[in-house]
Image (cartoon, rainbow, N blue to C red):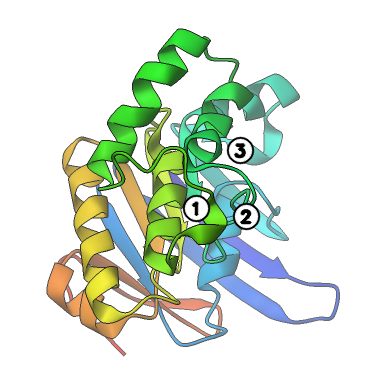
C-alpha cells in the first residue's frame, strides 16, 4: 500500500534529512519509525502524507505516485489518511465535539452523520460525555485522544502519527497505544514515528530504524534496535 523508491530529502541549507530510503508497508500493518532525534523520522512522515515533497525518488500510496496527483486526486488521498501531530494542532478554544467534527465537515459529511459518528469515536477514546468541554481544559493525554479521534473519525485507510506520545507520561502513553492497537486491529494501517523505547519494546511490531537520514534496519517483529 505504501512504497518509497530511492527517496531523499535535502533542504536548502544543504542538510540531508533522508538519503535513499526504500520501504514497503502493506495494508493493515503497524510500523514504528525509530531513531535518535534528527534521524529523519518526522521528515519521512511529512513526505508520506505529502506535506513536503522529496528531493529525489518516488512515493506510492495504493499504487499511485503521490507527487503527480492532481488537486482532486490529492483531496481523495487525504480523505483516506488520518494524521496525528506531536503538538496536537487542535482548536483549543473549541469543544471536543467540534474538534472531531471539524474533520468530517472538511469532507462535507452530512450533519446527521456527524452527530452519529463523533460520539461513537469519542466513546472508543474514553471521552464519552466530554463532548461539550473546551479542549484547552483537558489534560495532555485527553487532548491527544481528541487528536486521535479527529484523525480516525472518517475511517481512513492509513494513519500517520508523528511522536504521539512525546509529551505524555508512561501510563498515559501506554493507554494511548492500546487505542492505536485497536484502530490497527480494525484494519487501519498505522505508521508511527517515535523515540519511546519502552513502547516499541512492549508492542513488538515491525520496526524501521533511521540513522542520520538512512534506513539502517528493518525488523519484522523487533524491539528498540539502536
Residue drawn at x 50%, y 78% is 214
- Measured as percent of width and height from the top left, residue 43 is found at 60, 66
The answer to which of 105 and 225 lies nearer the viewer is: 105
| Sequence order check, earlier mark of 3 and 2 | 2
Answer whether residue 28 is visible to the viewer in this image: no
Residue count near mark 2 (Cα–Cα under 10 Å), binned few <14, some 14–19, many ≥20 = some
Answer whether labels 2 and 1 touch (C-beta < 8 Å).
yes
Name the quadrant of the N terminus. top left
CA gap between label 1 and label 3 equals 10 Å
The outermost residue toward the right is 12
Q: Which is in the foreground here, disc 3 or disc 2?
A: 3
Name the quadrant of the C terminus. bottom left
Residue drawn at x 22%, y 69% is 174
| Sequence order check, earlier mark of 1 and 3 | 1
Left or right: 172 with respect to 113? left
Callout 3: SS: helix
Callout 1: SS: strand
Amino acid at each position: 500500500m505504501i512504497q518509497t523508491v530511492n527517496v531523499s530529502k535535502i533542504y536548502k541549507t544543504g542538510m540531508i534529512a533522508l538519503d535513499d530510503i526504500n520501504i514497503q508497508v502493506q495494508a493493515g500493518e503497524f510500523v514504528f519509525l525509530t531513531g535518535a532525534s534528527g534521524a529523519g523520522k518526522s521528515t519521512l512522515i511529512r513526505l508520506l502524507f505529502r506535506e513536503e515533497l522529496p528531493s529525489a525518488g518516488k512515493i506510492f500510496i495504493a499504487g499511485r505516485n503521490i507527487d503527480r496527483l492532481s488537486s482532486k486526486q490529492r483531496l481523495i488521498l487525504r480523505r483516506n489518511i488520518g494524521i496525528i501531530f506531536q503538538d496536537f494542532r487542535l482548536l483549543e478554544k473549541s469543544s471536543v465535539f467540534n474538534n472531531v467534527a471539524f474533520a468530517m465537515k472538511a469532507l462535507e459529511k452530512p450533519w446527521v452523520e456527524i452527530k452519529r459518528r463523533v460520539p461513537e469515536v469519542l466513546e472508543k477514546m474514553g471521552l464519552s460525555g466530554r463532548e461539550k468541554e473546551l479542549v484547552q481544559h483537558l489534560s495532555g493525554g485527553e487532548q491527544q485522544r481528541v487528536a486521535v479521534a479527529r484523525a480516525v473519525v472518517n475511517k481512513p485507510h492509513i494513519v500517520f502519527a508523528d511522536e504521539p506520545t512525546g509529551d505524555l507520561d508512561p501510563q498515559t502513553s501506554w493507554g494511548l497505544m492500546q487505542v492505536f492497537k485497536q484502530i490497527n486491529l480494525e484494519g487501519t494501517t498505522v505508521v508511527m514515528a517515535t523515540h519511546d523505547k519502552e513502547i516499541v519494546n512492549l508492542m513488538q511490531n515491525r520496526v524501521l530504524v533511521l540513522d542520520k537520514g538512512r534506513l539502517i534496519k528493518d525488523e519484522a517483529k523487533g524491539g528498540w534496535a539502536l
